Amino acid sequence: MVDGNAQPFDLIGEPKLDDDAVVALAVAVQEAAVLTAETLAGVTRRQATVSIGDLLEPVKARDLSTDGVACEISTMDGGPLAILLVSDEHTVALADVFFGGPGSGAERRPAPIEVQAIVSSLPPVIEPVVAAVTSSGGHEIQMRASDSITAPAADLVRLDLSFDIDGIVIEAALFAPDPDRVGPAGGTSPEMLQLAAGIPVQFDVDLASVPMLAAEVQGLATGDIVIFDAGVDDEVTVRSGNREFLRGSVDDTAGRRMLSVTEVLSTH
């Protein structure tokens, strides 16, 4: 079974990302959870689900704890992207899975061969999540375990990952540059803009408002006529929720109503 379980993110701190970028990030990470689960199931040849935490918690790089196994994640040309932290016990368990075992963990330091199993096998599994959080789509990633790691930025966010492989739950934490901090400097990525462009937007066309007495409303029945007294040339407003986007007029062509835009109020 393949399942992606992700919720829209609450980006703590000053909300510097625009609404489209925040929604696109949530969509991208949700899709990444599905791809990660599919890859994990393929690599292990077992049923796998992936759960992704619903909170990007801000963390200063100077406060980052390196208990357990710390891995630098970078592009193949060495560009730093993120850091992955896995506890010793869960590293042993995940290595056991990659070796074909049941996923038994142990409260001990992992052996070098177990760490190498993680470094070699995990990159293609978590690449979709890394790409979504860091906007690094299209770049193959690599991992390096070290006792001395270099953070990709001073301001990071933490994303919790939970891998369920045949009922064995293995947890890890991904630390990436805080998108609230790096978003305005680098601009919204093409990947995020593409995702945002594909998000459906529901519009309401307001032809007119009609004041009526409560008694009149209660007395309405099938077949009654409510006159709202709006002609085809009268101005109408297009809204999404409480936000006005367009003004225009209604045209009648071959028995169908169409909107001719006369003023664009907002496109964001």
Image: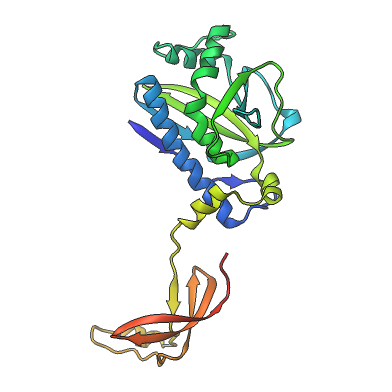
Examine the image and state in which quarter residue 257 appears: bottom left
Query: Residue lying furthest front in this view?
Result: 77
What residue is rendered at 55% in x and 32% in y? Answer: 160
Query: Residue lying furthest left in this view?
Result: 223
Residue 179 in view: yes
Q: How many labels does the image show?
A: 0
What percent of the width, then of the height, locates residue 141? 56, 29
In this view, 101 is above or below 228: above
In this view, 91 is above or below 222: above
Camera-side residue of 58 and 95: 95
What residue is rendered at 56% in x and 68% in y? Answer: 267
Examine the image and state in which quarter residue 31 appears: top left
What percent of the width, then of the height, locates residue 212? 41, 88
What residue is rendered at 34% in x and 25% in y? Answer: 47
Residue 162 in view: no
Viewed as shown, does residue 64 lie left or right of 160? Answer: right
Q: In which quarter of the image is the C terminus?
A: bottom right
Viewed as shown, does residue 180 lie left or right of 229? Answer: right
What percent of the width, then of the height, locates residue 129? 52, 35
In this view, 116 is above or below 194: above
How is the model colour-coded?
Answer: rainbow
Q: In which quarter of the image is the N terminus?
A: top left
What residue is rendered at 39% in x and 86% in y? Answer: 251
In this view, 71 is above or below 222: above
Viewed as shown, does residue 126 lie left or right of 145? Answer: left
